Image: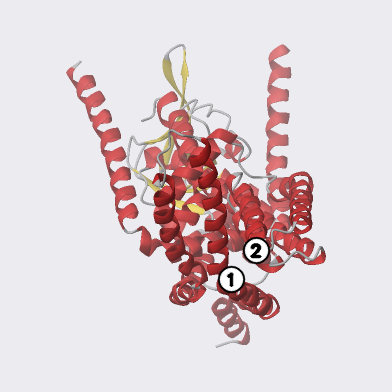
Amino acid sequence: MSKKRISNVILQKIRGKEGDILPVLRTIPIFEGLGFNDLKKIELIVHKRTFMPDEVIFYERQPGAGMYIIKRGLIKLTKTVNEERVKISELKDGEFFGEMSLLDDYPRSAEATAVEKTEALGIFRPDLFDLIESNPKLGYKILLRLSKRLASRLRETTEMKLKEIG
Amino acid sequence: METTDFKKAWKTFEIIALIFILLSILLILYFVRELLTPFIIAFVIVFFLNPIVDYMEGEGINRTLAVVTLIILGVFVLLIIWKLIWPTLQGEVNNFKDNAPVYIDRIQAGLNRTIDLLEKNISIIPKGTLGKALQQKINGFSSGMGDVGSLIKIVKGLMTALIIIPFVVFFLLKDGRKIKKMLIAYVPNKYFETFLVLFHKIDQQISNYIRGQLIDSFIVGLLAIIGLYLSGVKYSFFMGAVLGIVNIIPFIGPLTGLVFGILLILIDTGSTVHLIKFIGVYFCIRMLDDIIVSPLALSRSVHVHTLMVIIVIMLGGFLHGILGMLLAVPLYCSIKVTFQTLYKGLIEYGNW
């Protein structure tokens, strides 16, 4: 066994196992570049949820409580337009939705429904706020990444509006 | 049409079943309330210490190590306080116990004089009726007075609790978050977000209130002991400790402390100087508490109407004594917030 492998084994013993949540968290822009210890703290507030086909994850206009990351499966986002359900998009493994609800309980803008059996990781505002309060350094990192994401969303919307105006 | 009716009926049945289950749990808890005391104390300690453990963990200390360090530190601080204050406090309690028969005689003599006066001046009252009733009351009171001194009994109870409390505190501080996560995992997807927000709100209401009240009462007790000791009032440690402990109960507690202090001075020495000193110290502390201590300690606590606070505290006292009184307000707030959240999340947005 090489020295590097031995040190990796020892390190893993001390840190604990990586599990199946951390690799998923690493791919999410809000947690991008965070270290192992920070991700372990976030893992503590992650709730694993399984949704059956056609099961509603959240309803439109329901007060938002947090975001979901799709670990495995498929979900669709729909919206009521002129009293009709219109599909906005479909999201698959590794994609996430509802991150705006991490900041406030503004009503959800769309309804999320599982298309097939879906395993999702939920991160919710009350837990995140507690984490930020007790770990301000980690909180700063998360909030900065969340703000960047909101800024880029706002830029996209502004550009779209400008194009519409002509 | 029939399916909609069936769905509506099923939803109503679900609501009724839920209420029935909750009431059954409350009823069971009421019947085993005597066994609950050490657990309630442990929960109170956990609510108080949890933010400190969270902070230590945030600073990079392993949670288990943080909990162990905090418990050892807590026991150490308690032992120091015990060593410093207990001998004086015990002396005062023993003195009070020794003097109890004299105090009762004095109360009886004073009341007899008042009754004689009443019976002489108000002809409607037949002679001897009030005196007889009073004698019965006094006898009952003096047998109760024996219990006041039996602090040993309370200490014995505490010793049993001392075995349970540290274990419960240790595991709840260390694994509380995991336990909470495990419990909420059983909530169906449909209600998950609503219940998660609800649990969090309840947790915040109770922990902010308990933390605030404990800090406030500790400071009030300390100020009372110092104030009474410096002004040379007899039983300063005993009375200061009582003022601090009763301060845990809002409104009713401080008033009880005032009445207790005045009565104790009146039946002990009856000294007007001591009485003025006590009342002076009491009102200085009340002012300090209302202006500085309370706003700081209870800044994140709940806001409930005074009348409601008094009603729920009395109800809490009736159900579970002092601990019931301490938990009455946060429990009332939790029930209120439960209905508000359930209404908003489940009924108003139609996803029940």
Rendered-image quadrant of the N terminus of chain B: top left
Q: At which x and y percent is residue A17?
A: 51, 71
Residue drawn at x 48%, y 41% is: B119
Task: Kindly give the residue lying farthest to the right in the view shown.
Answer: B230
A63 left or right, relative to A117: right
Question: Distance from label 1 to label 2 (Cα)?
Answer: 8 Å
Residue in front for this viewpoint, B347 or A148? B347
Query: Does residue A35 show up?
Result: no
Q: What kind of colouring is applied to the model shown?
A: secondary structure
Find residue B99 and name its label: 1
B35 left or right, relative to A100: left
Q: At which x and y percent is residue B188?
A: 35, 43
Circles 1 and 2 in contact, beta carbons < 8 Å: yes
Could you tell me which chain the residue with mark 2 belongs to? B
Amino acid at pointer 2: Asp
Question: Mark 2, residues whose alpha carbon is within 10 Å: few (<14), some, or many (≥20)?
Answer: some
Amino acid at pointer 1: Asn
